[in-house]
Amino acid sequence: MTDEGYIKFNCQWQQGTLTHKTHVAAILYWRQQLYQHNLIGVDEEGVGFGNISHRVSNHMFIITGSATGGITRLTESHLAMVTQFSLAQNSLTCTGPIKASSESLSHAALYAALPRIKAVVHVHHAGIWQKLRHLAPTTPDPIAYGTPAMARALQALAQNNDHQENNLIIMGGHKDGIITYGQTLREAANRVLALVS
């Protein structure tokens, strides 16, 4: 286990190249939109925040890499493919030019919980977080970011609130943390962009 913003799970990484260019292009486009709205970036302590992913098939998905929040414009070299994961064992296997994001198990939990969704977005915004905390579905405050407990809490909330209009979860114990999801990255990203525009 390490500090926030960095990998807290057992990550088996095999360096390699990514396929699925359409998914890659969509991630790079929407990540840039979120970055430009300061929903992904680096905090005052220099810790990166925010990541997005796109499901490829079943439980495989492409996600922005670890510690990439502060990079102005991502390229394919900043993405990873998660190929296997276990919430119970707090572990995952990934391949690509970089290790998968520290929040990958939270994304994995949502994909496992909701077969209909194809995209997950994790951003930070103090105003939205404060306004919607405990009004929108919210994870319990004691649960820490990047832990199996957080992944399970997100999974339970998503299953209990599986409606098209309720695709937003506030991370109660992860200051400013917000998760959105949808059938496309456009849907997931616009869910939070609509709240800041």
Image: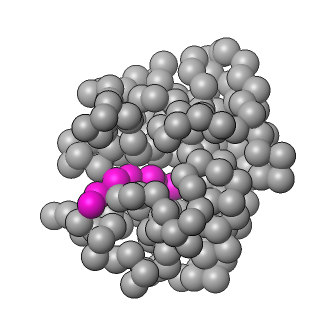
Q: Between residue 100 and residue 188, name the one nearer to us.
A: 100
- Please provide the residue range marked out in magenta: 120-126
Residue at x 59% of width, y 34% of height: 2
x and y, in percent, of residue 182 in the image: 50, 64
Give the x, y percent position of residue 70: 32, 30
Q: Residue at x 40, y 23 (%)?
A: 75
| Residue 78 to residue 149: above or below | above
Residue under the point 51% across and 69% down: 141
Quarter containing the C terminus: bottom left
Q: What type of secondary structure mainly makes up the magenta span?
A: strand
Pick out the residue farthest to the left.
197
Q: Quadrant of residue 99?
A: top right
Residue 11 placement, left or right of 52 = right
Residue 76 in the image, given as x and y percentages of width and height = 47, 23
Quadrant in which residue 96 is drawn: top right
Indicate how the structure is coloured in the image: one colour
Image coordinates for residue 194, horizontal then vertical, percent: 25, 67
Seen in the image, is 16 located left or right of residue 121? Answer: right
Magenta-colored stretch includes residue 124: yes
Q: Indicate whether 105 appears above or below 23.
A: below
Query: In the image, is residue 26 part of the stretch drawn in magenta?
Result: no
Q: Is residue 126 visible?
A: yes
